[in-house]
Amino acid sequence: MPAPRRIAPYAAAVTGDVEEGEDEVATGRLILLHDPDGNDAWGGTFRCVTYVRADIEGELATDPLLAEVGWSWLREALEAHGAGYAAAAGTVTCVTTRGFGQMSDDETTAQIEIRASWSPDDLAIDKHTEAWAELMCQAAGLPPLPDGVALLPSRRQRGRS
């Protein structure tokens, strides 16, 4: 995906989706910003910025602790992958959508959105990317894989190679 151009002289961005069967249950993007002159607000020369949106059960959207839990998913994913960071900032938003009038037959939906940024301690960007992917999976409600277990691609994914 195109990276923002006005925030830093150098930037790269990727997008990702989490699918269950034919349904997209989470989507997100990860942007790496670089300013060789540094940025006081970042506390360094690099900044990771992410956006993750996932469908959730309707009852969860009204849970007063969901925002704190969503933020903890980010911190835990970074720590689990050894992705050192500083100056983390962000928001967690929970949204419920319900139709009325001619849209009253539409299904009520709920989503969580996590917008965050942090300054990586080093250039092990692969660790930050893995943490971002785990964050998307956690937000989508997929259980984490135990250490030493690898996810095999589905038949549909193997057919794309």
Image (spheres, rainbow, N blue to C red):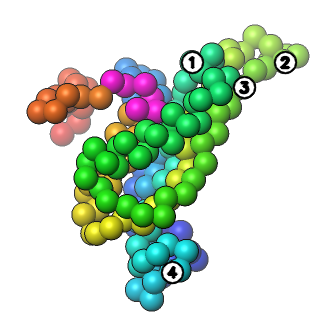
Query: Residue at label 1?
Result: 57
Q: Nearer the viewer, mark 1 or mark 4?
A: 4
Classify 10 Å Cα crowding around label 1: few (below 14), some (14-19), many (20 and above).
some
Q: Nearer the viewer, mark 3 or mark 2?
A: 3
Name the residue located 42 percent from the left edge and 64 percent from the top edge: 86
Q: Position of residue 124 (x, y in %)?
A: 24, 63
Name the residue located 35 percent from the left edge and 43 percent from the top edge: 77
**View extreme (left): residue:** 148
User: CA separation, marks 3 and 2?
Assistant: 10 Å
On the image, which quarter does residue 136 sit in? top left
Q: Position of residue 85 (x, y in %)?
A: 37, 61
Q: Which mark is residue 39?
A: 4
Query: Residue at label 2?
Result: 100
User: CA separation, marks 2 and 1?
Assistant: 20 Å
Label 1 secondary element: loop
**View extreme (bottom): residue:** 37
Name the residue located 65 percent from the left edge and 27 percent from the top edge: 64
Q: Point out the stretch of residues depicted in magenta.
A: 138-143
> Mark 2 or 4 closer to N-term?
4
User: CA separation, marks 2 and 4?
Assistant: 47 Å
64 within the magenta span: no
Classify 10 Å Cα crowding around label 3: few (below 14), some (14-19), many (20 and above).
few
> Mark 3 or 4 closer to N-term?
4
